[in-house]
Image: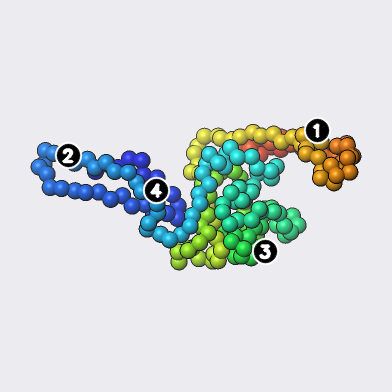
Amino acid sequence: MVKNGVAVAIDTVVRVDIAMKVGATTESVQVTAQTAQLQTDKAEVTTQISTKELEEIPVPVNRNYQNLLMMVPGVSPPNTSSSPAANPARGEVFSVNGDTQGASNTRIEGANAINGWMSHETGYVPGLEAIETVTVSTASLDADQGLAGSASINVQLKSGTNQLHGSGFEYNQNNAEKANRSSCQRGSASRSSSTPARRHFWAVRSSRTSFSFRQL
């Protein structure tokens, strides 16, 4: 029996029901059925961020996948905390369903990725180019989602190859493209009176090296 089009993601249970009947040795039985869209085997509330979303949704200049967690229902907008010395990976903090910021747990390829000194932050943040999918479970977690109180975040990396892969990107920020501050609008002040902000950032990343150029 061959069943095509069955999507299998991490932290999910996929069931394929088939019906078999006795037939002669010269006959073949082909069962065609649609996979149920509703997950009935687990009570978890799970959201998956796909490769397409990771690659195409704009993120800030730090290119941290955690910025996309705000798309998950119940997750507060992530923000960076602590100094670079205490948080060198620049992991971002957030709360889920109103719980404390340290109640969630992040795993990369099944390994715990929490900062050992700052338990509410992630100790390692892989680049967007290296991530296949991000699965976020926010309610009714199974027992295998250990160390997670409010949410369990599982990051699945892409498989490696012997070929060189990479990406290039550019960020540009200046006053001409910024929205005027509300305080300037209330006082009828011109846009030029706001704090100047000019930033240009180029970067090229590959599977083995990274080059960055910044103009402030």
Give the number of the mark in front: 3 or 2. 2
The residue that mark 3 highlights is 118
Amino acid under disc 1: Ala
Structural distance between the alpha carbons of marks 1 and 2: 68 Å
Amino acid under disc 3: Met
Q: Are marks 1 and 2 in contact (CB under 8 Å)?
A: no
Structural distance between the alpha carbons of marks 4 and 3: 39 Å
Residue 37's label in the rendered image is: 4
The residue that mark 1 highlights is 176
Structural distance between the alpha carbons of marks 3 and 1: 39 Å
Residue 11 vs 178, above or below: the answer is below
| Residue 25 seen by the camera | yes
Amino acid under disc 2: Ser
Which of the marked residues, 1 or 4, is nearer the chain's N terminus? 4
Which of the marked residues, 1 or 2, is nearer the chain's N terminus? 2
- Taking the spot 74% from the left edge, 59% from the top edge, the residue there is 82
Give the number of the mark in front: 3 or 1. 1
Which of the marked residues, 4 or 3, is nearer the chain's N terminus? 4
- Taking the spot 64% from the left edge, 56% from the top edge, the residue there is 76
Residue 35, position in %: x, y?
Answer: 34, 46
Circle 2 residues within 10 Å: few <14, some 14–19, many ≥20? few
Which of the marked residues, 2 or 4, is nearer the chain's N terminus? 2
Quick check: 13 left or right of 106?
Answer: left
